Image (tube, rainbow, N blue to C red):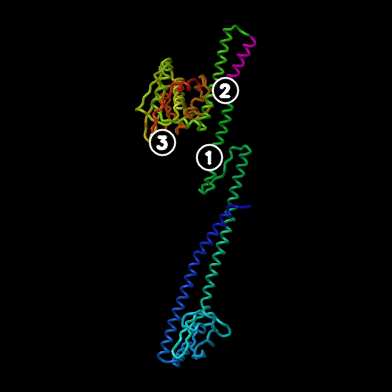
Amino acid sequence: MRSSALNLAVGYISLGLAALGLFAAPIWYAWRTTVQDGRTEVLQADARLLSDVFHRQGAQGLTDYINTRLALSIPNERFLLLTDASLRPLAGNLSAWPRHLPAQSGSYTVDVPSGSHASSADVVYEALPGGYHLLVGRDLARYKPLEHRFWYALAGAVGILSIFGTLGGVLIRRAMLERIHGIRQTVSAIIQGDLSRRLATDRSGDELNTLSRTINGMLEQIEQLIHGVRNVSNAIAHDLRTPLAELRSRLEELSLTRPPPEQTFTELEAAVADVDRVIRLFNALLRLAEIDSGMRRSGFVQLDMAEVAANAVEFYQPAAELKSCALTITSNGPAPIRGDPVLLAQALGNLIDNALKYTPEGGTIRVDVRRGASHSVGVTVSDSGPGIPDSDRTKVIERFYRGDASRGTPGVGLGLSLVDAVARLHGSSLRFEDNNPGLRVVMMLHQDAPQAARSGEAAPVRAAPEAVAQSAGPA
């Protein structure tokens, strides 16, 4: 089985061997060059010294000098040879003149006879006056042990690098397989339906832990979505049952009793109201589905949120007057924002409609639009009603959730869910605060500055009253 850990280990071993080779090659080249040059320089200096002795004392003096020097030096450390014109040895530690040695003076590497065998040596040959020949050399085997140690050390380094690299690859592979086995078991359990399972993590910040935390976050979101779908399905079934049961009961009663036309039309109007309630429920769900999918981002334009809020307040002003509630709006001037005017009007309409539901007669409702820093716009709807308990503030945006205070009011519990979805679509979220008395709902919208710049500062779009009217009615 191919393993990414072993492949990675092989790659690192290869890289280490290449780096070791790149490190050793220059050292070897510098060693050979330095030793070769230094050896040649020493031999040339030695040859010049002997040549000077020859010029001062003649052939016999040089013969005596060489014999004396060889008696004091280490055997075979240096080769010395003085011959006459016929290459007959006169002095030195070589038994014969080396074969294949060029006739010109200079530095050469040749095989020289040394005892019972021939040795490879660097030599300096110099022709002396009178036909005499001088040869000075040094055995190359002197440096062989050092060279062998270098190669042994290089081979040892290669072996250690290969062994530890392979061992490290095996250990890493084993550790990764254990982690992957745990991930496989968790994923298998999730596939079988256990959505509560999570990948194991620890405090280390390695890549697998980071991936596991990311996957766990995804699993949390998936579990919430699935539970949400289950709850929505149960809520839809529950909320559809009542109007459909009432509709069927009315139609069945009409079919059995066949009452007078006036009573029949009254029952038909009630049946139509039940159908309208079901249609509003599905329309709200469709709007939420469009918002959650991000499809409505294509409708983003440059608009004035203060004008959208003014239209919403104007639309709900008659309903507020019927309830003797004071509905007012305040702003600090135009509030340009990039967004969907229809969705923003519906969201604001739902907030005002909720405030009207729960604000007692003679109460106050205020809509405030403020242009903030960094191209942000804050929209606040506050009322003097009973407010929302702290324990319910995180639940009221759930679909079909209805608190104790809303049990007797019309609606199916989708109003604030729609508002929250619109806020998230515009990069915001709902915040519930105490108004003492009453509730204050804050929605902070953030202007998309780069998109606004590319849009060429388009003229603000006015939200038509029909857009606000779409949000009217219990949701």
Residue 454 numbered mark, or none: 3
| Residue closest to the eye, 266 or 360 | 266
Residue 436 seen anywhere in this rendered image of the structure = no
- Label 1 vs 3, first from the N-terminus: 1
Q: Which of the two marks, 1 or 3, is nearer to us in this view?
A: 3
What's the amino acid at mark 2? Asp
Is residue 239 shown in magenta? yes
Mark 1 secondary-structure assignment: helix
| Residue closest to the eye, 123 or 221 | 123
Q: Residue at x 56, y 39 (%)?
A: 219
The residues bearing labels 1 and 3 have C-alpha atoms spaced at a distance of 35 Å
The residues bearing labels 2 and 1 have C-alpha atoms spaced at a distance of 32 Å
- Label 3 vs 2, first from the N-terminus: 2
Left or right: 425 as drawn, with respect to 329: right
- Packing grade of label 2 (10 A; few <14, some 14-19, many >=20) is some
State which quadrant residue 245 falls in.
top right
Residue 217 numbered mark, or none: 1
Q: Residue at x 60, y 52 (%)?
A: 3
State which quadrant residue 456 falls in.
top left
What's the amino acid at mark 1? Gly
Mark 2 secondary-structure assignment: helix
> Which residue in the protein does label 2 denote?
239
The residues bearing labels 3 and 2 have C-alpha atoms spaced at a distance of 45 Å
Q: Which residues are magenta?
A: 235-257
Residue 167: % across, % down: 58, 58
